[in-house]
Amino acid sequence: METKFGRDSFFDGGLLSLVGWSILGAIITICSLGICYPWALCMVYGWKINHTVIDGHRMSFSGSAVALFGNWIKWALLTIVTLGIYGFWLTIKLEDWKAKNTNFLN
């Protein structure tokens, strides 16, 4: 898709690769009883971002599962302390974390 700046934006990942990463993430999450979900999330999200080009600039995901796991524990405790109210912000907090760990390579 040609943009007004003359550069292309596209996604170059394949369906089989996405299915494979998603199945692997699900298996890891199930086998660890959910403890490794942050790692599976980083793995799949990183694959998506690393195959994305915006205005001719390839994107890169620099987030780590360890950092997300730390946030995951903090967010879980806040949700428990607030009797579930903080849970409404979890999706936004996760998207904010993803955005903070997404960069352009070039």
Image: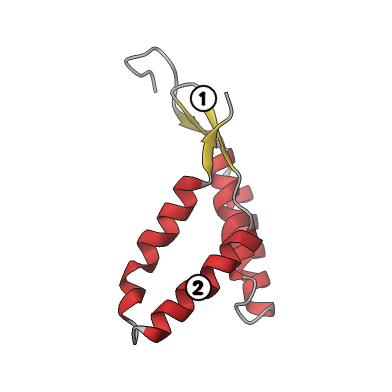
At 47% from the left and 54% from the top, the residue drawn is 97
Q: Is residue 19 visible?
A: no
In the image, residue 54 sits, relative to residue 6, either above or below, namely: below
Q: Quadrant of residue 48?
A: top right
In the image, residue 106 sits, relative to residue 67, either above or below, namely: above
**Amino acid type, callout 2:** Lys
In the image, 9 versus 97, the foreground residue is: 97
Residue for badge 2: 74
At 40% from the left and 80% from the top, the residue drawn is 79
Residue 99: percent from the left, percent from the top?
A: 45, 46
Residue for badge 1: 57
Work out which quarter of the rendered image holds the N terminus and state it: top left
At 31% from the left and 72% from the top, the residue drawn is 88
In the image, residue 1 sits, relative to residue 70, either above or below, namely: above
Work out which quarter of the rendered image holds the C terminus and state it: top right
**Amino acid type, callout 1:** His
Does residue 16 appear to the left or right of 54 in the view shown?
Answer: right
Q: Is residue 34 visible?
A: yes
Q: How far is mark 1 from mark 2, CA to CA?
A: 34 Å
At 59% from the left and 39% from the top, the residue drawn is 50
SS for tag 2? helix
Question: What count of labels does the image hold?
Answer: 2
Dot 2 crowding, Cα within 10 Å, few <14, some 14–19, many 20+? few
